[in-house]
């Protein structure tokens, strides 16, 4: 039964209540619990209320291509199937429209039938499926070489069969983006595209695993088997101990990954990527600062706030936690 829920933005005062929601929704080992402060301070976390009680939450963060990513969706077990997640998603559709964000994306496990139904009912469409794999880095001769942008690069990527298996989407940082010509140019300028074993892979600036030890990658073009066999050595040569990536959910690609020593990560065995287009509305006249920006302004004055807001050629710290219910 769909009900109406009051939605508001979360603050650090809600931290304990949000932990209770996570424990009810997933359990005491929910990975979101240790990231709650970070999620509240960076991006936007909305909560759904039943009176004064927080019964659900969801996180929104802008992405590199001008879209936004929804993650860390949690609903108390005793409030499921009552429209909590749908209300939270709709609140972010409004935020995206006012912020001139053209699309919202999220991912969910294929086995999360109830969650996927709610996502589709909220206007999202499935656009691709991925499987997450990982393994230890290893010695070898393979190296990764950064690729500068040129028009031939765009043509080669757009004709890539392995990219077509993922409907043109690749993992980057903690979300997914479509490799349109504009995004190829953007990722090349961000030094994210690399030549590996004659093919092309995208490397993330902020890996999903420990940033100091794991290289995060996605397949873009070339022979998937060759790239996957070379990736452990390329990771070690770049100073990483592990290598992880989201691969197109394709039998041949996953078979090549298994032969290359990769194992499927259980929570990412079949990840369904959803997207919803947003009708962009008039730009909001009032730009809401993040709690981190507000705190910085109070501590250090307007100079620090300007740095966090992206002035003087410094950007803010970027997106955090991304997954839908694991």
Image: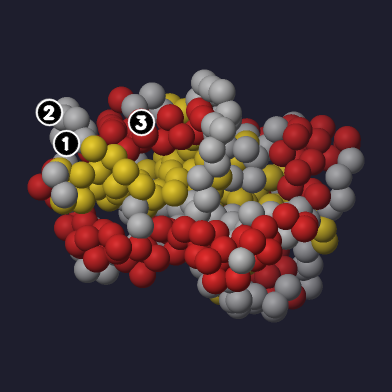
Which quadrant of the figure contains the C terminus? bottom left
Q: Nearer the viewer, mark 3 or mark 2?
A: 3
Does 184 sit left or right of 21 as displayed?
right
Vertical position of residue 185 compared to residue 136: above or below = above
Q: Nearer the viewer, residue 241 or 290?
A: 290
Q: Residue 314, how many percent across, how many down? A: 72, 60
Does 313 sit left or right of 137 as displayed?
right
Packing grade of label 3 (10 A; few <14, some 14-19, many >=20) is some
Residue at x 19%, y 30% (from the top left corner): 4
Q: Is the C-beta separation of discs 2 and 1 under 8 Å?
A: yes
Does 49 sit left or right of 157 as displayed?
left
State whether residue 197 appears in this view.
no
Q: Nearer the viewer, residue 40 or 78?
A: 40
Q: Give the mark nearer the N terminus: 3 vs 2.
A: 2
- Under tag 3, what secondary structure? helix
Q: Residue 148, how many percent across, how many down? A: 87, 50
Residue at which label 1 appears: 81
Q: Residue 81, how many percent across, how many down? A: 16, 36
Residue at which label 2 appears: 1
State whether residue 301 appears in this view.
yes
Residue at x 55%, y 59% (from the top left corner): 293
Q: Give the mark nearer the N terminus: 2 vs 1.
A: 2
Q: Alpha-carbon distance for marks 3 and 1?
A: 16 Å
Q: Quadrant of residue 119?
A: top left
Q: Is the C-beta separation of discs 3 and 2 under 8 Å?
A: no
Q: Alpha-carbon distance for marks 3 and 2?
A: 17 Å
Q: Nearer the viewer, residue 263 or 104?
A: 104
Which quadrant of the figure contains the N terminus? top left
Residue at which label 3 appears: 90
Packing grade of label 2 (10 A; few <14, some 14-19, many >=20) is few
Q: What colouring method underlies this structural image?
A: secondary structure
- Under tag 1, what secondary structure? loop
């Amino acid at each position: 039964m769909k009900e109406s829920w009051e939605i508001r933005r979360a603050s650090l005062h809600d931290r304990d209540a949000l932990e209770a929601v996570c424990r009810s929704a997933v359990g005491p080992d929910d990975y979101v619990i240790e990231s709650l402060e970070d999620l509240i301070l960076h991006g936007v976390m909305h909560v759904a209320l039943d009176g004064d009680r927080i019964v659900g939450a969801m996180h929104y963060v802008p992405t590199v291509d001008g879209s936004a990513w929804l993650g860390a969706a949690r609903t108390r077990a005793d409030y499921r199937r009552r429209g909590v997640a749908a209300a939270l998603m709709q609140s972010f559709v409004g935020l995206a429209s006012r912020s001139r964000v053209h699309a919202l994306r999220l991912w969910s496990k294929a086995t999360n039938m109830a969650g996927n139904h709610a996502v589709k009912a909220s206007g999202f469409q499935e656009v691709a499926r991925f499987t997450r794999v990982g393994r230890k880095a290893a010695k070898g001769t393979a190296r990764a070489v950064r690729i500068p942008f040129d028009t031939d690069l765009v043509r080669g990527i757009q004709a890539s069969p392995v990219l077509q298996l993922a409907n043109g989407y690749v993992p980057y940082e903690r979300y997914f983006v479509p490799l349109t010509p504009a995004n190829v140019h953007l990722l090349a300028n961000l030094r994210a595209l690399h030549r590996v074993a004659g093919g092309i892979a995208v490397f993330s600036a902020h890996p999903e695993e420990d940033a100091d030890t794991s290289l995060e990658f996605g397949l873009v073009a070339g022979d998937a088997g060759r790239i996957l066999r070379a990736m452990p050595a390329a990771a070690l040569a770049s100073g990483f101990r592990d290598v992880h990536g989201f691969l197109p959910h394709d039998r041949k690609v996953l078979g090549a990954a298994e032969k290359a020593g990769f194992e499927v990560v259980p929570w990412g065995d079949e990840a369904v990527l959803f997207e919803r287009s947003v009708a962009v509305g008039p730009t909001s006249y009032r730009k809401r600062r993040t709690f981190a920006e507000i705190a910085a302004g109070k501590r250090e004055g307007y100079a620090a706030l300007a740095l966090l807001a992206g002035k003087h050629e410094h950007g803010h710290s970027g997106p955090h936690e991304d997954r839908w219910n694991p």
